[in-house]
Image: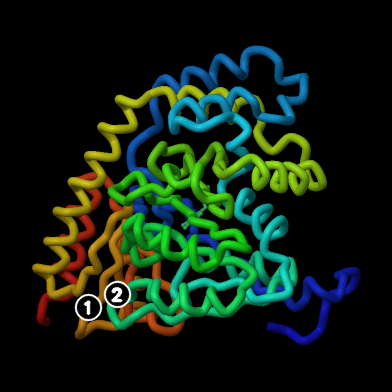
Amino acid sequence: MTNTVPAFWSPRIGALEPYVPGEQPRIENLVKLNTNENPYPPSPVAVEAIRRAAESGLERYPDPTSLALREAVARRHGLQVDQVFAGNGSDEVLAHAFFAFFQQAEPLLMPDVSYSFYKVYAQIYGIQCEVQPVDDGLRIDVDALAARARKGCGGIVIANPNAPTGIGLPLARIVQLLEACPQRVVLVDEAYVDFGGESALSLIPRHPNLLVVHTLSKSRALAGLRVGFACGQSHLIDGLVRVKDSFNSYPIDRLASAGAVASLDDEAWFRTTCDKIVDTREGLSLQLEDLGFDVLPSQANFVFARHPQRDAAELAALLRERAVLVRHFRQPRIAQYLRISVGTREQCMQLVQHLQDILAPT
Ligand code: PMP
């Protein structure tokens, strides 16, 4: 990073280290397994709803309260409408939550291996963080996190299943964190929960400090639409609304609302697609193990794997030369792992074939 701040920048932005999203290149016949997108198209009912929404009303602003969408979430998850907040992708919801709840005198706690955007939000809002090392199997050390929280903290944020490991925590462990941190918010980011994790939504009535964040980008194949939501008791939702109404009154546009509502109501499409991805993930994990990879047990739509004899950055580069994209993080503790999104069966077969070639003794 340069030490000089370009003209016109305010001093603080020169010091930011922004999140780097996975690349979205324009390469033909790409096997794109780098950003945990759903390999299948979204519900056709959702696509039709977006088409219809485009036919009239675009000259008007959308509903600033996103009521129809919040009602659909409440219906799907057995919540009250005032327990739901909607935003422009869960990244925006997370950012608002950091602003609303974590600007405290004590540090925000998170595992050292986690979704890397959390540190970026903390940085932009001047939130002090303290990381808790995951164990040798890259599992979140809940006992250590809870013990640290009991001494006083500004809140806790975790992804469950965790990113980029895919490892899930059972609900009892979430309760342990909620009880260790009763004065502050515990944010559970469930971006990947629909692929086999245990959701903490059922804990909301009993825990006033629980905020659960979901996205329609993964299990509902709507990454291009940008819709996410948070669920919690209404006092937390009111806090988020205050931030949103100080930032952007209309985060959910008319097309996004129509598509998201239809998608949330299409349970059959959702179940079939998630089941296919889980099934493919199990097959892919076994095939990677056959190739000599250590594969972490995943409850997400990706697997996290390392090859004991081959450098992960080099493998990612060799795959890229063959138009197969996977994600590699140059970060402490996980630099020898590849995060591979679960594609269609066909895409996963192509990945495995390329890896077989690359790993074959010459
Ligand atoms: N949380 C986690 C753990 C993620 O991996 C992602 C995807 N990068 C998000 C949140 C954000 O998803 P979106 O903004 O597409 O809803």
Q: Is residue 323 visible?
A: no
Q: Residue at x 60, y 59 (%)?
A: 185
Tell me whether the residue at label 1 lies in contact with that at label 2, contact meaning CB atoms closer than 8 angstroms. yes
Residue 164 in percent (x, y) is at 39, 65
Residue 228 in percent (x, y) is at 55, 42
Mark 1 or mark 2, whichever is nearer to me: 1
- The answer to which quarter of the image holds residue 138 is bottom left
Query: Which residue position holds label 1?
Result: 307
Q: Is residue 339 visible?
A: yes
For the residue pair 132 and 250, the one nearer the viewer reads as: 132
Query: Which residue position holds label 2?
Result: 315
Quick one: SS at disc 2?
helix
Q: Residue at x 25, y 68 (%)?
A: 296
Which amino acid, by three-letter code, is at mark 2?
Leu
250 to 296, vertically: above or below: above
Quick one: SS at disc 1?
loop
User: Which quadrant of the figure contains the N terminus?
Assistant: bottom right
Residue 340 in percent (x, y) is at 31, 61
For the residue pair 146 and 362, the one nearer the viewer reads as: 146
Instruction: Report the side of 95 relative to 204 (left or right).
Output: right
Which amino acid, by three-letter code, is at mark 1?
His
For the residue pair 219 and 2, the one nearer the viewer reads as: 219
